[in-house]
Image: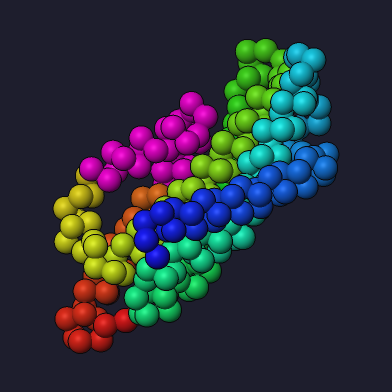
């Protein structure tokens, strides 16, 4: 195909991906009440408050969109892969499905980590801290933004780890490069933890810790990969 035919195929792929996200968003909107209960369950908060007439509706729309985008990610990722697969070599094509499965696994692990560890710990900390200052009257919109930021931030960080493994596997990064970049990576990790979480030290540390651990495991994988290549056992 020529350039314009490729562009047309990309447009069709993006339209299909957008349609999938819209349908998933509508489905989440229809079930927003049980969705809210699920998101707020680890916070342990009995009552939330609305501080403007449109706050409830805007919060439902925002939550439905992010939930739809995340829930439909296997489908729109598959549609994106359908567009990119013809450009890949045979060896690369064989690794797409394993890496896609790994991607779904790690994004699920990130969300589960946020849901079961980060959210309960951070919420309990601030509830106790605020008791000496004033009464905890938390708004629905701000509280759900807080929960979504943590959940999506953890999912994104764990997903980035899969991308890092992909670069290592195909030789774009080596263990030596990763070791030399460790100090800069630590600064980047702290920066990402700061922008992907609410502005508090506890949330940032609970995200930065797993990020640092994942980076160190990627260094080990890069060392293992280079050993295999040296021994002529290319995977």
Is residue 64 toward the left or the right of residue 213 in the image?
right
Q: In this rendering, is residue 148 above or below 92?
A: above
| Residue 200 covered by magenta stretch | yes
Judge whether residue 109 can be spotted in this image. Answer: no
The residue that appears at 42% across and 38% down in the rendered structure is 193
Instruction: Answer left or right for 105 relative to 123.
Output: left
- Residue toward you, 163 or 208: 163
From the top left corner, tell me how far across and down residue 42 is, in percent.
70, 42
* Residue at (37% x, 80% y) in the render: 90
Q: How many marks?
A: 0
Residue at horizontal 83%, vertical 39%? 33
Q: Is 195 a magenta residue? A: yes
Q: Quadrant of residue 118?
A: top right
Residue 28, percent from left and from top: 75, 45
Q: Is residue 78 visible?
A: yes
Which residues, given as a range, are shown in magenta?
A: 184-210
- Which residue is located at x 72 percent, y 48 percent? 23
Above or below 2: residue 153 = above
Depth check, front residue: 124 or 47: 47
Residue 51: x, y in percent?
A: 75, 14
Q: Give the x, y percent position of residue 102.
A: 49, 67
Q: Is residue 36 left or right of residue 175?
A: right
């Amino acid at each position: 195909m020529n350039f314009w035919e490729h562009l047309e195929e990309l447009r069709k792929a993006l339209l299909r991906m957008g349609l999938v996200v819209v349908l998933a968003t509508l489905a989440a909107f229809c079930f927003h009440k049980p969705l809210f209960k699920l998101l707020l369950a680890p916070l342990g908060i009995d009552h939330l408050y609305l501080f403007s007439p449109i706050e409830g509706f805007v919060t439902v729309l925002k939550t439905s969109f992010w939930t739809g985008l995340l829930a439909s990610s296997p489908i729109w990722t598959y549609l994106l892969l359908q567009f990119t697969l013809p450009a890949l070599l045979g060896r690369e094509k064989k690794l797409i499905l394993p890496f896609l499965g790994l991607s779904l696994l790690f994004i699920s692990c990130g969300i589960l980590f946020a849901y079961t560890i980060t959210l309960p710990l951070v919420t309990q900390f601030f509830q106790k801290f605020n008791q000496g200052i004033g009464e905890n009257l938390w708004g629905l919109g701000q509280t759900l933004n807080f929960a979504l930021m943590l959940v999506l931030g953890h999912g994104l960080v764990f997903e980035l780890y899969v991308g890092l493994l992909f670069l290592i596997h195909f030789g774009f990064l080596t263990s030596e490069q990763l070791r030399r970049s460790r100090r800069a990576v630590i600064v980047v990790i702290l920066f990402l933890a700061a922008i992907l979480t609410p502005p508090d030290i506890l949330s940032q540390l609970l995200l930065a810790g797993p990020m640092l651990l994942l980076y160190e495991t990627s260094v080990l994988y890069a060392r293992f990969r280079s050993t295999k290549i040296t021994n002529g056992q290319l995977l």
